[in-house]
Amino acid sequence: METEWVKIYSTRQSYEAALIQGMLKEHGIESVIMNRQDSEFLVGEIHLYVYQSDAEQARKLIEETREK
């Protein structure tokens, strides 16, 4: 099992990260969301991580989704 996580996406919108995470899950790619936003002012970004072995496929899926 691959244990190294890599960041594949960053956003300031929590719903966007959740939508991408759901799409990745539908394709069998496990991911985690790391919310770095300050809760009061929503300053910072939300990062999406996947296992290194899934990173290339995940990036490709995200790009294909954004093109639609």
Image (cartoon, rainbow, N blue to C red):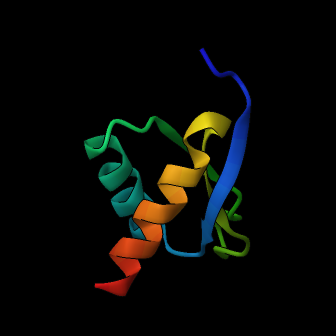
- Residue 65 lies, with reference to residue 3, above or below; the image says below
Residue, far bottom: 67
On the image, the x and y values in percent for residue 2 come to: 64, 22
Please name the residue shown 42% across and 38% down the image.
29
Please name the residue shown 28% across and 84% down the image.
68
On the image, the x and y values in percent for residue 51 come to: 61, 35
- Foreground residue, 66 or 18? 66
Please name the residue shown 34% across and 36% down the image.
28
Locate the N terminus by quadrant: top right
Q: Quadrant of residue 53?
A: top right
On the image, the x and y values in percent for residue 12 come to: 59, 75
On the image, the x and y values in percent for residue 56 come to: 58, 52
Q: Quadrant of residue 64?
A: bottom left
Left or right: residue 31 compared with residue 2: left
Residue, far top: 1
- Residue 18 lies, with reference to residue 31, above or below; the image says below
- Foreground residue, 5 or 43? 5
Please name the residue shown 55% across and 40% down the image.
54
Left or right: residue 6 compared with residue 67: right
Q: How many marks?
A: 0
